[in-house]
Amino acid sequence: MDDPERPSERLVEQRLRNRAMEALVALSKGDSGVRSVGVGDYINLFFDVIDDIPWQWREWSCFTPEEVERLDAVHGLLRRPAW
């Protein structure tokens, strides 16, 4: 039975999607956008939502296939070693 006090899974995923999009907005502004948030805080903002553990974000119905592809590309770049 549904609990009226608990949001639906879709609503939770949509809220997390909105946070992921906020991270992409900062990134879209380049270095100054990331610096405005703070580099460490930016990384935390992104990986709070777009990470493989504990989220299976690629399977969320709130993302379009294009969004998954682009988020996955950013995810890969941020996980790449800096050396």
Image (tube, grey):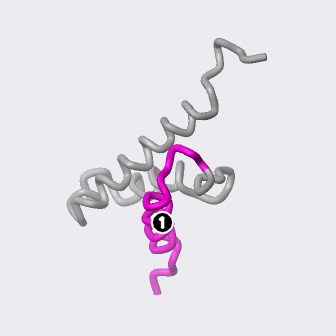
Q: Is residue 17 above or below residue 4?
A: below
Say if 67 sits above or below 16 in the image: below
Task: Give the dominant element type of the magenta stretch: helix, strand or loop.
Answer: helix
Left or right, 65 with reference to 1: left
Residue at image position (58%, 34%) is 10
The residue at the point 64 percent across, 59 percent down is: 52
- In the rendered image, residue 82 lying in the magenta stretch gets the answer yes
Query: Who is closer to the viewer here, 10 or 26?
Result: 10
Crowd class of label 1 (few under 14; some 14 to 19; many from 20; radius 10 Å): few
The residue drawn where x is 45% and y is 74% is 77
**Residue matched to label 1:** 69
Describe the element under mark 1 as helix, strand or loop.
helix
Against 81, residue 24 (above or below) is: above
- Residue 68 location in percent, x, y? 50, 60
> On the rendered structure, is 8 left or right of 46?
right
- Asked whether 60 or 23 is in front, the reply is 60
